[in-house]
């Protein structure tokens, strides 16, 4: 993938659709080599490549920074978990996996209810599945769960008086992510991994057709 031709919207779509269950990259690799980009084009390409390749590492780093800021605020910790969960539901892979596991557990004691929780069929247009499909979680549109968990987290943020703390923690976490992604030199392993995941995505779409 030529990251120089990848737009911010393409990167967001890729992060939304990619599997986030992969383990983080090893710390020696994560802190291996840092160099200053020679041009804006080099910096932009490096930033997008590292955000995609080290996405799990950045996510864990931000969560750890948030946890350190909420050691004395139990409600804020719960609010942070709910916020993380609402954001995770925006990822197609997480939403599908969560829905499948919950449905499988419900099926053990109520097959009828589990049948209602199955996702609806993808509409077919001229022999092909529609490109604009709505992701469902437990039989409901994904935005329902995002709205529920987001609303609950906002209430807890207000009760814990930790909104300012989370803003500072997010600022520190995002700044650390931006600095690392800007100066970490992409390696061959990152490029090969990107090509492999692209092939898997294409093969998965071909199998669905």
Image (cartoon, helix red, strand yellow):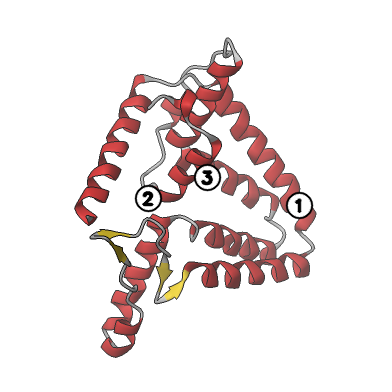
Which residue is the site of mark 1? 165
The part of the image, by quadrant, that contains residue 99 is bottom left
CB-based contact (under 8 Å), mark 2 and mark 1 = no
Q: Which residue has dot 3 on it?
A: 59
Whole-percent x, y for residue 37 in the image = 57, 14
Image location of residue 172, percent across then percent down: 69, 39
- Among the two numbered marks 2 and 1 on one chain, the one whose residue lies closer to the N terminus: 2
Identify the mark nearer the N-term, 3 or 1. 3
Task: Judge depth for marks 3 and 1 and give the one in front.
Answer: 3
Q: Secondary structure at mark 2?
A: loop
Q: Which disc number belongs to residue 35?
A: none
> Label 2: which residue?
21
Rendering quarter of residue 146 = bottom right
Residue 30 drawn above or below residue 65: above
Discs 2, 3 touching: Cβ within 8 Å: no
**Location of residue 64 with respect to 46 vertically, above or below:** below
Marks 2 and 3, how far apart at CA: 12 Å
Crowd around label 3: few <14 · some 14–19 · many ≥20 (10 Å): some
Instruction: Tell me if mark 1 has few (under 14), some (14-19) or many (20+) residues whose alpha carbon lies within 10 angstroms of its own.
Output: some
Q: Identify the mark nearer the N-term, 2 or 3.
A: 2
Q: Residues within 10 Å of mark 2 (few under 14, many from 20)?
A: few
Q: Identify the residue at image location x=37%, y=49%.
A: 19
Q: Position of residue 195 (x, y in %)?
A: 30, 31
């Amino acid at each position: 993938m030529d990251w120089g031709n990848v737009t911010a919207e393409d990167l967001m779509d890729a992060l939304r659709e990619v599997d986030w269950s992969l383990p983080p990259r090893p710390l020696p690799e994560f802190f291996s080599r840092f160099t200053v980009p020679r041009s804006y084009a080099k910096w932009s390409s490096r930033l997008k490549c590292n955000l995609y390749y080290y996405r799990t590492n950045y996510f864990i780093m931000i969560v750890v920074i948030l946890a350190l800021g909420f050691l004395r605020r139990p409600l804020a910790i719960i609010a942070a978990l709910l916020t993380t969960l609402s954001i995770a539901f925006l990822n197609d892979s997480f939403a599908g996996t969560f829905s499948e596991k919950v449905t499988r557990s419900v099926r053990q004691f109520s097959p009828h209810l589990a049948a209602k929780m199955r996702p609806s069929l993808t509409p077919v247009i001229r022999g092909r599945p529609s490109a604009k499909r709505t992701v469902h979680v437990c039989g409901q549109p994904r935005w329902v769960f995002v709205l529920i968990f987001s609303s609950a987290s906002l209430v807890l943020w207000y009760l814990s008086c930790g909104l300012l703390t989370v803003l500072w923690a997010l600022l520190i976490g995002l700044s650390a992510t931006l600095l690392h992604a800007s100066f970490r030199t992409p390696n061959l392993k990152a490029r090969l991994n990107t090509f492999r995941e692209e092939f898997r995505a294409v093969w998965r779409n071909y199998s669905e057709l």
